[in-house]
Amino acid sequence: MEIDPSLNLEKKVSSEGPLLAELPLSGLAEMFKGFSKLNREERLEMLLEFGLLKKSDVDYLERGGLSDTTLGEKFIENVIGYFQLPLGVATHFRIDGKDHVIPMAVEETSIVAAASKTAKWIRENGTISTEVIGQDIIGQIQLSHVRNFEDFEQKVLAQRLEFIRLSNEEVAFGLVRRGGGVRDLTVRKVARGDGTDMAVIHVYMDPVDAMGANVINQVCEFLKQPIEQLTGDKVTMCILSNLVDSKLTRARVVMEKIDGELARKIEEASLFSKQDPYRAATNNKGVLNGMDPILIATGNDWRAVEAGVHAYASRDGQYRSITEWKREGGKLVGTLTAPIIVGTVGGVTSLHPTAAICLRMLEVSSASELSRVIAAVGLVQNLGALRALTTVGIIEGHMKLHIKNLSLAAGASEKEIPFVQKKLEEILALKKRISLSNAIDVLKEVRSRMQESSC
């Protein structure tokens, strides 16, 4: 594969550090031009050339990743093998002025392509910026019944600082050394629905670059005994919360140059997903199309993030979109706000070799930066979907990329696929719809013609 000599890669390629930041801006803008047209080996070579992969990473990926189940036995129970997902990379992302190649582990057609296409559109016409609001995750200590809530609350809050000190000294000392640890403690009254109340203590902890689930659970369990001794009431359960509204990630896209009518349509589509929960559910699923593949690729708990996203989307009593698009002057401005709790150390993130490769490829320096990248990709994915829905519709783009899957599902061989694809594309253009039945019929026709030509 030929690399543009103007990028001067021979002088820049190094195994000791990231390369993207060292490249000239013109090179960054052009580096992935035609990337989707390359074969797998050429893509890996390009990522190696740009310092995003090491030679050992390429060798590992070319072997197909993990095959020995020894590591799997350490993760879960009753292991019988691995379930492989395709790992791709989305390109053209410039987030907070920094370029990123986005690893995405996902099985669904068009997600990677749509993310890359929309990121390129934004790169040429706008900006992506992000921020994290707050830093603490939440642990809950629940007491299903308390004799006197006001008395209970007063006693607990009077010992608040002591509980924080003990938690940091006895449990969260590792986080404290890295600048985190337990920060605060509050008491909530929650109605039981029968005229009485339960008490819930919230423990707030900064997990630094870890997700923090295990530590916050241990802190809550540790506080169980001193709380019971102090109050005389019985703790029912201790568990983290996935609705972490104390640590929100926000992404913002500003489209400086956009057709006014397209901007109006996207704003209307956004209003639809804000006001109607039926549409909001599908909108947010589309946002997660961008977020989940990164979470999976980096070994993070996508189920926890999804739970938090959906709970946050319902925070005012109605399920709504976590994204919003509005016209401001001649610009289109989009925002995404959600709890995205991730880690760059600990757990599968540290142990799974593919996750380690993906984190290096992303070139993120902290869990906070990873959450910001994930939010940005989710918002970009949303813009791409709304752009398609309000112009050509969902079928044209998605189904065109889905044609190869239909060809394979029909039983086409590698030799037959190009012929089946071409005919299915013609049917899609004519009828605006295709199905597996079409693919099966076309395959029969292709095989019949091949048989006739061989006679």
Image (tube, rainbow, N blue to C red):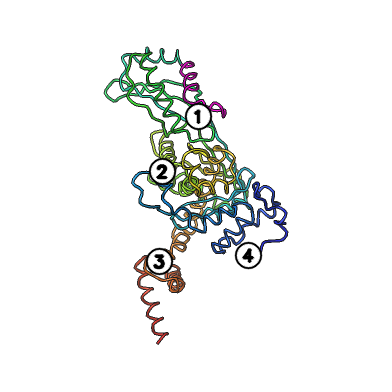
Find residue 103 and report its horizontal and vertical position in percent. 53, 51
**Viewport quadrant of the N terminus:** bottom right
Q: Left or right: where does residue 253 sit relative to residue 240?
A: right
Q: In terms of sequence position, does the residue under pointer 3 or pointer 1 come before the other?
A: 1
Numbered marks: total: 4
- Crowding at dot 3, Cα within 10 Å, few <14 / some 14-19 / many 20+, comes out as some
At label 4, which amino acid type do we have?
Met
Q: Secondary structure at mark 2?
A: helix
| Mark number, residue 1 | 4
Question: Which three-letter amino acid code belongs to the residue tagged 3?
Answer: Leu
Spot occupied by residue 225 in the image (x, y as percentages of width and height): 37, 19
Residue 186 quadrant: top left
* 48 relative to 240, above or below: below
The amino acid type, in three-letter code, at marker 2 is Phe
Residue segment shown in magenta = 160-180
Q: Earlier in the sequence, mark 4 or mark 3?
A: 4
Which is more foreground, mark 4 or mark 1?
4
> At x 39% / y 85%, what residue is drawn?
452
Q: Which mark is residue 408?
A: 3
Q: Label 1: state its secondary structure.
A: loop
387 displayed left or right of 84: right
